[in-house]
Amino acid sequence: MKIILKYRQLALILGFGLFTLAGCDWMGNSKGESEIKPVEFETKEVIHKIGQDCIDELSCFDLKLSFPELNKVDTPISKIIQDTIDHLILTPIFEDKVYQNQDELYADIEQAYNEFKLDFPEVESNWFLNRDIKIIAQRDGIITLSFYESSYLGGAHANEMTFYKHYNGTNGKVVLLENFFTTSQRTQLNKLGEQAFRSKRGIEPGTSLEESGFWFKEDQFKLNDNFYFDNTGIYFYFNAYEIAPYSYGSTEIFIPKEAYESI
């Protein structure tokens, strides 16, 4: 059985205390005028064990899904959010496929896992897949989701990934960094981000990022769109394999609010 593992740019939504600029939010509304009716939801959890002889932890594939299920899908934005959640739940892990429901996902995983056990009966390992999807904020006209996945699928090591994405609560459009900061502001923010990155990774100013093992284009640091806000500032998250080998792990950097409010 050939397992194809991919680094997936999964779109998700998050942002705790989204700030406003010059008395307006990013959509141009005055403060207090951009509030949207929150989508209501319940958190569902599914635990599924896969394996022909699932008698102990080394003979099972443990699958755990945690996700919000909207109480009503009766508006364009609620449909976009629910469709996004459903897509993330059913993201294929072995190859490019489209699943219509969770049962098809389970069946495909079970077939692949059982084939692996038949091909390599001497290999004992606890395979697992955990997916945790959350609606973590609904404010300032923005709905935010987070996605976390951890897995071990018989390779050299386990894998983890975390993604955040923001949506316009009125029309469902994806909100990027450029919607919060102007071009000149993003240039200054990027400089602050590089300072935070070098400090986090122990890289001295002037030292090449490439020589330090990182994969930024043309050896120039660049913030990504995998970010979220809280009341103290903005966080950027770089997943393993995104800008460096797996052995480097993930990197989260923080830029305090007082550092970017004046740019």
Image (spheres, rainbow, N blue to C red):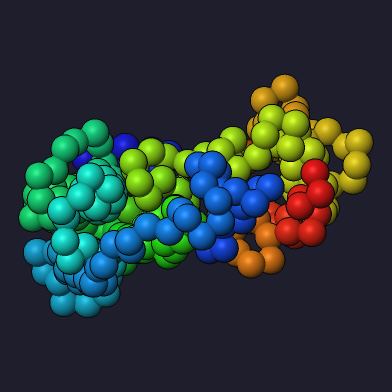
* x and y, in percent, of residue 90 in the image: 21, 49
Q: Residue at x 41, y 45 (%)?
A: 168
The vertical placement of 252 against 76, above or below, is below
Residue 175 screen position, x and y as percent: 47, 41
Picture quadrant of residue 184 = top right
Foreground pick, 76 / 255: 76
Q: Is residue 78 visible?
A: yes
Residue 43 coordinates in the image, percent (x, y): 26, 71
Q: Where residue 105 appears, x then y in whole percent? A: 15, 51
Q: Nearer the viewer, residue 50 or 79?
A: 79
Q: Quadrant of the N terminus?
A: top left
The residue at 18%/36% (across/down) is 97
Tell whether 45 sits left or right of 241: left
Residue 226: tell me if it is visible: no
Q: Residue at (10%, 51%) from the top-left corner?
A: 101
User: The C terminus appears in which quarter of the rendering?
Assistant: top right
Above-or-below relation of 233 to 215: below
Residue at 57 percent of width and 63 percent of height: 17
